[in-house]
Image (cartoon, rainbow, N blue to C red):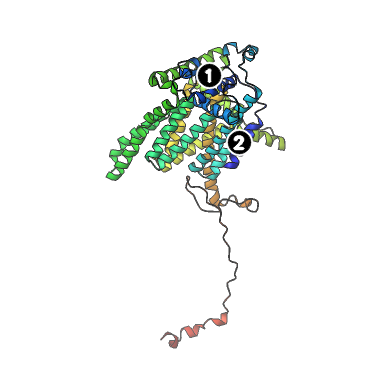
């Protein structure tokens, strides 16, 4: 896992100095001082301003911590004014353009968080399937061009993916062991995800819906002990929206004065701003969910694909002209089908079912809410692709190993195991070398055996 983190961090850092500047980087760096002003939660910073309503605060906290760790100022520049966006010189003259060192520091912070996402995805893929599934998910995400691109910009989108991955992990652990500790952890992660990009806050609603389903169906169980256990689990899911909202409010002092009204202001602002982005640029406008699906397919099925690099290398090596169009989504869809098979196999109350519910809910929220086709809005869907590909790789490994399909690798690498079937959620065992006895079995001479007539002799049987 550490090696995967270092691999991803190095890939992100390699692009820090060459990735094109985006004006949103100026705004995230500008809000670095939020981490300092937490000491004054009722101060001027947390009043009902345009920038305060513009974004939840967790990404600004992340950027501020990164600036402090790298000994950079918390107020490196003023906020970029998009009214003068076409006149870049105006923003630069006004002081909205961050210095090269401040920009580099913010990008390193984003790259570090992006590498944490890769490590967390490995853990998630491992619990969903096995080590091979986790490794496939981590490598897919680490080499994904959109993941690297955003990981080399001073933006908060990598923090969203990190919190989503941790939420899915916590959901898996809760479904396996439904204690109050895991229930509270899950609710807090829902709230912190909302404090990063709003949409994860809504994931607490399908979790509560699942709890209501458990509560209704608990009466159908014959055993009283089973009914009690299922009702307790249902209660811990039903309270998820309350825990999530409490964590969301605590994380943002702007909400403390009027939690409900200011939360509505945040969601209303995000909807209006996304529609305004589409009106300013007709190319980015998304009128309905069908168009949203088409735009998403173009983004992560053509423009940004991990498989494109692999296919390009194969074409260069063997002189081929293979087209990787749509390969990533196709593999992810196969993995999604296998994910559903695992849910059918393990049952509706299994960890796999809960994780799949949250993955589909987050994907649906993105598709339904997408009204402006900006590349960074698709980053959580790249995470979903990685999760589905982890299931695909893990299941393939599980079913090929018993047939000794990887025997040709012996002598080149150490295989995790040689034989035996594993459940889909079992980790791969550590290889154990067993000493094979080569001692020859002595052959029995024919003259040492009794003669047939001796066996039939009465003296030997009496």
Closer to us: 13 or 130: 13
Residue at (41% x, 39% y) in the render? 174
**Mark toward the viewer: 1 or 2:** 2
- Circle 2 — which element? helix
- Circle 1 — which element? loop
Residue placed under numbered mark 1 in the picture = 372
Closer to us: 135 or 89: 89
Assign the C terminus to one quadrant of the image: bottom left
- Name the quadrant containing residue 254: top left
Q: Residue 363 placed where, x, y %?
A: 48, 28
Residue placed under numbered mark 2 in the picture = 8
Q: Is residue 348 visible?
A: no
Closer to us: 241 or 50: 50
Residue at (46% x, 34% y) in the render? 167
Comes first in the chain, label 1 or label 2? 2
Q: Residue 298 placed where, x, y %?
A: 58, 25
Q: Which mark is residue 149?
A: none
- Name the quadrant containing residue 251: top left
Disc 1 from disc 2: Cα separation: 29 Å
Q: Residue 365 placed where, x, y %?
A: 46, 25
Q: Is residue 421 visible?
A: yes
């Amino acid at each position: 896992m550490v090696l995967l983190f270092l691999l991803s961090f190095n890939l992100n850092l390699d692009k820090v100095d060459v990735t094109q500047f985006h004006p949103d980087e100026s705004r995230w760096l500008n809000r670095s001082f939020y981490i300092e002003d937490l000491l004054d939660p009722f101060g001027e910073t947390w009043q009902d301003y345009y920038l305060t309503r513009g974004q939840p605060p967790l990404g600004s906290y992340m950027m501020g911590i990164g600036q402090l760790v790298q000994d950079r100022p918390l107020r490196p520049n003023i906020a970029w004014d998009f009214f003068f966006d076409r006149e870049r010189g105006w923003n630069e003259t006004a002081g909205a353009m961050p210095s090269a060192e401040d920009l580099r520091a913010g990008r390193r912070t984003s790259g570090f968080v992006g590498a944490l996402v890769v490590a967390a995805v490995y853990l998630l893929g491992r619990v969903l399937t096995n080590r091979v599934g986790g490794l496939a998910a981590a490598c897919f995400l680490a080499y994904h061009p959109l993941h690297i691109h955003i990981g080399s910009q001073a933006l908060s989108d990598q923090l969203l993916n990190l919190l989503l991955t941790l939420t899915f992990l916590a959901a898996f652990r809760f479904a396996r062991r439904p204690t109050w500790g895991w229930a509270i952890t899950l609710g807090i992660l829902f709230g912190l995800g909302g404090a990063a990009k709003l949409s994860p806050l809504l994931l607490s609603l399908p979790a509560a819906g699942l709890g209501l389903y458990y509560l209704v169906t608990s009466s159908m169980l014959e055993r009283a002990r089973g009914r009690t256990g299922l009702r307790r689990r249902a209660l811990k899911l039903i309270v998820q929206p309350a825990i999530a909202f409490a964590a969301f409010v605590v994380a943002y002092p702007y909400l403390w004065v009027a939690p409900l009204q200011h939360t509505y202001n945040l969601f209303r602002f995000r909807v209006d701003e996304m529609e305004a982005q589409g009106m300013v640029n007709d190319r980015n406008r998304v009128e309905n969910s069908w168009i949203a699906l088409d735009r998403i397919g173009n983004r992560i099925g053509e423009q940004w694909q991990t498989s494109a690099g692999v296919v390009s290398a194969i074409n260069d090596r063997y002189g081929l002209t293979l087209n990787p169009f749509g390969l990533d989504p196709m593999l992810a869809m196969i993995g999604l089908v296998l994910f559903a098979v695992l849910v059918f196999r393990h049952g509706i109350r299994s960890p796999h079912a809960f994780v799949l519910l949250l993955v589909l809910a987050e994907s649906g929220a993105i598709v339904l809410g997408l009204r402006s086709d900006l590349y960074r809005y698709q980053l959580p869907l790249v995470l979903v692709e990685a999760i589905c590909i982890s299931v695909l790789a893990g299941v393939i490994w599980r079913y090929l190993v018993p047939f000794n399909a990887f025997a040709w690798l012996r002598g080149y690498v150490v295989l995790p195991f040689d034989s035996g079937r594993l459940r889909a959620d079992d980790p791969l065992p550590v290889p154990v070398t067993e000493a094979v006895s080569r001692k020859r079995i002595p052959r029995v001479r024919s003259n040492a055996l009794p003669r047939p007539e001796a066996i039939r002799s009465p003296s030997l049987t009496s």
